[in-house]
């Protein structure tokens, strides 16, 4: 399939953003003064951007603010905020996401959409271009849009040409008469080309490619080939395309929030049929609500295992909606809803075991999914084994709904032996006072929390050396003992430091309690 791209260019993005912000502010009326955006450059304030009225009065980028005020005293002035411009451009990319999931930023102040295979859903390429233009102009934005067979050709036509739609295979014909400035090369390169009499792309295309590469570099020759449509490089979208995606578009904006759940259920049923044919299940689900005013709300759901159970996923959706700090507001209505499954995994048909363990595992997994949907993935954790012999590092907590990491098996206890590790560990270990027969032997008694414990039985030592790559060379060696006092309580004690080798007076600590 031949690729097709739609390039959007917003020549007054910064000032249009400020005008829109002014209109949205409560009680703020439209400002009829010409608006300029200034930034400090080499110690002087210069114009970084101008709105249409300022351009019509002769102001241009790069002009000093003093000169601009001398020409037009009643200027409206705002400071440049490139980060805010990028965030606004990303919001516009989210608006365009309803037309195609492949949307990329095209700096400065532009977007590129890969519309291959989806233009017919909107009545053709010309109709799609017109609909996107109408939606963006409703937001008060000035834009130019062109469609071509490569991203560079579409960008060149949008920013330097007047062709709305270049037919397949017609990029070279439509772009040949564009000026060499479309190459966006350094100013000295453009000046050298003009002095050589090469003023249009047709002049450059008539020259051997090797000559251009030798004189001006391969980058210029490569960009020329891409603008002429001879070489295509795919765009890198802001959001990776999902493994599965279904959506609904409405002829009239949907304002009835009570009907949203029924639409979400139909989308889940449709996605489940697609996943069943593939033998897969989803691990992550994202529901996008596109409002008619350009705003986009997205709800992300996660499951602890691959799933295509629509009832279970719908319960997660309800939990998520109930916990939203900012409820779903249709505004002037939703005109599109999309369900995307970004992560899919193989899912075979489950068979319930005779002992019912599969049913129990599924119930626990459903509970985890509901807790994650209500409290967030970072607040529902599970324990995993770590590859370490250090007691504090043998286990770690990870999000229960996260992707499973490489499984480290839990150490199996010896058959018939008591547990080697207690159920409760103190962090940090608590110091105790002890009395031992010999400095490197087990304790006879110890005092913890003002209570004296007489040792009836002791087992050990289990020597655990420090992990020098983490703890450093000065961390002492530990000798652990499992001890039981006269009342039958069992403790896990260790002596920090080897007697007369690492410490003259080793210290004792209580690290854990056995059940």
Image (cartoon, helix red, strand yellow):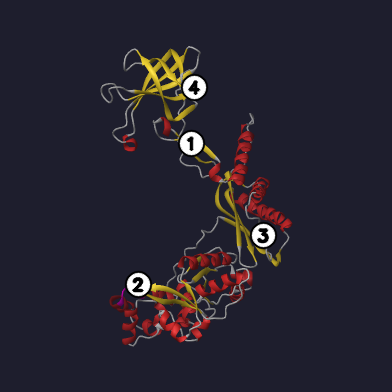
The answer to whether residue 28 is seen in the rendering is yes
Alpha carbons under labels 1 and 2: distance apart: 50 Å
Which disc, if any, is residue 326? none
Query: Is mark 2 in CB contact (under 8 Å) with mark 3?
Result: no
Residue situated in front as seen by the camera: 161 or 83: 83
Reply above or below: 409 against 38: above
Q: Residue at label 2?
A: 219
N-terminal of the two: label 1 or label 3?
A: 3
Reply above or below: 411 against 301: above
10 Å crowding of disc 3: few (<14), some (14-19), many (20+):
few
Alpha carbons under labels 1 and 3: distance apart: 40 Å
N-terminal of the two: label 1 or label 4?
A: 1
Q: Residue at label 3?
A: 329
Q: Nearer the viewer, mark 1 or mark 4?
A: 4
Q: Residue at label 1?
A: 384
Q: Find out whether residue 6 is within the magenta segment.
A: no
Range of magenta residues: 216-220
Alpha carbons under labels 1 and 4: distance apart: 20 Å
N-terminal of the two: label 1 or label 2?
A: 2
10 Å crowding of disc 4: few (<14), some (14-19), many (20+):
some
Alpha carbons under labels 2 and 4: distance apart: 69 Å
Left or right of 464 on screen, residue 362: right
Reply above or below: 286 against 418: below
Q: Nearer the viewer, mark 1 or mark 3?
A: 3
Q: Where residue 37 appears, x then y in whole percent?
A: 47, 75
Reply above or below: 88 against 268: below
As helix, strand or loop, the secondary structure at mark 3 comes to loop
The answer to whether residue 8 is seen in the rendering is no
């Amino acid at each position: 399939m031949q690729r097709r791209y739609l390039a959007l260019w917003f020549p007054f993005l910064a000032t249009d953003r400020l005008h829109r912000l002014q209109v949205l502010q409560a009680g703020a009326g439209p400002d009829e003064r010409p608006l300029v955006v200034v930034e400090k450059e080499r110690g002087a304030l210069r114009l970084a951007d101008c709105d249409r009225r300022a351009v019509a009065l002769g102001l241009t980028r790069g002009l000093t603010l003093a000169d601009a005020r001398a020409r037009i005293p009643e200027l409206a002035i705002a400071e440049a905020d490139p980060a805010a411009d990028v965030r606004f451009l990303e919001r516009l990319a989210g608006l365009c996401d309803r037309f195609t999931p492949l949307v990329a930023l095209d700096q400065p102040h532009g977007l590129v959409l890969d519309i291959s295979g989806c233009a017919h859903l909107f009545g053709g390429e010309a109709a799609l271009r017109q609909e996107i233009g109408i939606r963006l102009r409703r937001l008060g934005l000035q834009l130019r849009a062109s469609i071509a067979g490569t991203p560079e050709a579409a960008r060149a036509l949008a920013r330097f040409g007047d062709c709305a739609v270049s037919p397949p295979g017609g990029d070279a014909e439509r772009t040949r008469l564009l000026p060499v400035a479309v190459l966006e090369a350094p100013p000295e390169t453009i000046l050298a080309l003009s002095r050589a009499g090469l003023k249009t792309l047709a002049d450059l295309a008539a020259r051997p490619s090797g000559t251009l590469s030798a004189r001006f570099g391969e980058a210029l020759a490569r960009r020329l080939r891409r603008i002429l449509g001879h070489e295509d490089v795919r765009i890198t979208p802001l959001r990776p395309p999902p493994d599965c995606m279904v959506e609904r578009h409405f002829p009239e904006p949907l304002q009835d929030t009570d009907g949203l759940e029924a639409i979400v259920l139909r989308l889940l049923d449709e996605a489940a049929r697609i996943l069943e044919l593939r033998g897969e299940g989803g691990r992550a689900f994202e529901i996008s609500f596109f409002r008619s005013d350009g705003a986009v709300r997205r709800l992300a759901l996660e499951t602890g295992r691959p799933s295509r159970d629509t009832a279970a996923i719908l319960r997660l959706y309800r939990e998520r909606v109930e916990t939203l700090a900012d409820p779903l507001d249709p505004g002037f209505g939703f005109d599109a809803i999309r369900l995307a499954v970004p992560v899919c995994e193989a899912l075979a048909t489950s068979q319930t075991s005779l002992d019912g363990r599969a049913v129990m595992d599924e119930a626990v997994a459903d509970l985890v999914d509901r807790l994650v949907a209500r409290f967030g993935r970072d607040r529902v954790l599970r324990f995993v084994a770590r590859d370490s012999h250090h007691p504090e590092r043998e286990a770690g907590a990870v999000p229960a709904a996260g992707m499973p990491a490489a499984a480290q098996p839990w150490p199996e206890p010896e058959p018939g032996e008591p547990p080697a590790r207690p159920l409760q560990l103190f962090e940090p270990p608590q110091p105790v006072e002890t009395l031992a027969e010999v400095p490197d032997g087990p304790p006879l008694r110890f005092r913890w929390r003002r209570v004296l414990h007489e040792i009836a039985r002791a087992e050990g030592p289990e020597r655990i050396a420090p992990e020098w790559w983490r703890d450093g060379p000065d961390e002492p060696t530990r000798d652990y003992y499992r001890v039981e006092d006269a009342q039958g309580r069992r403790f896990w004690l260790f002596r920090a430091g080897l007697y007369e080798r690492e410490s003259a007076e080793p210290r004792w600590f209580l690290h854990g309690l056995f059940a």
